[in-house]
Amino acid sequence: MSSSTETLSNFKEAALSIMSTRHPWTEFLSLSSLSLPSSLSQATTRIGINLTRFLFNYSFILLFILLLSLVYHPLSILLLLIAFAGWYFLFFTRESDESLTLFNLVSIDDRVIVVALVIFSLVVVAVTGVWLNVVVSVVIAAAVVCLHGALRTTDAGGLDDYESPYGPMLNEASAGSYSPV
């Protein structure tokens, strides 16, 4: 298997894993789960855990903010929806071992499909002149995601599935073995 085929396969698996992290919106938006973190390290740990746990919800928020930023550009919305539909139907929902066949004559490789979809997506953003809207909406969405991720507490049951990026440094029992620099 070539390197680019492995990369495409990994990209597809990552996208499918995003879709598998769906959690109910009631759990995601629960006000009883919000509290201020006690430290910066706790905030970054919460962001990491919540980003892993609610990746689908955060992706949906990103797309919703992008849609809101393009509300005055209906042609851009239409063309971007066509691009998203192309990505969804031509890449994400197909099995990795089946190739796309046109008219039972030509078999198209996944690499060709990805290149065509990337080019189409970039042309849509460039031609419609909404690249600044897209950049600003992604920055705003990232801020919203980080804010929610830092404020949302992680329940004790969910922490079993996720490893803290700080490992034993946050463990109170081993605090004596670490000294401040």
Image (cartoon, rainbow, N blue to C red):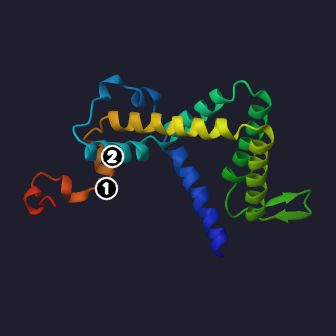
Quadrant (top left, top right, bottom left, bottom right) of the N terminus: bottom right
Image location (x, y in percent) of residue 41: 26, 47
Give the mark, 2 or 1, whose residue is nearer the N terminus.
2
Distance between the alpha carbons at the discs numbered 2 and 1: 9 Å
Mark 2, other Cα within 10 Å: few <14 / some 14–19 / many ≥20: some
Q: Which mark is residue 165?
A: 1
Q: Relative to 135, is 34 on the left or the right? A: left
Per the image, label 1 sits on a secondary structure element best described as: loop
For residue 171, above or below residue 54: below
- In the visual, does 11 lie left or right of 130? left
On-image quarter of the C terminus:
bottom left
Q: Give left or right: position of 12 versus 149.
A: right
Let me know if residue 23 appears in the view.
Answer: no
The image quarter containing residue 12 is bottom right
The residue at the point 71 percent across, 42 percent down is: 84
Residue at image point 29% right, 46% down: 159
The x, y position of residue 6, in whole percent, is 61, 69
* Neighbourhood count class around disc 1 (C-alpha, 10 Å): few under 14, some 14–19, many 20 upward: few
Residue situated in front as seen by the camera: 64 or 178: 178
Q: Which mark is residue 44?
A: 2
Asked if the residue at tag 1 contacts the one at tag 2, i.e. Cβ–Cβ closer than 8 Å, the answer is yes
Who's the residue at 56% across and 36% down the image? 62
Total numbered labels placed on residues in the image? 2
Q: Amino acid at mark 2?
A: Thr
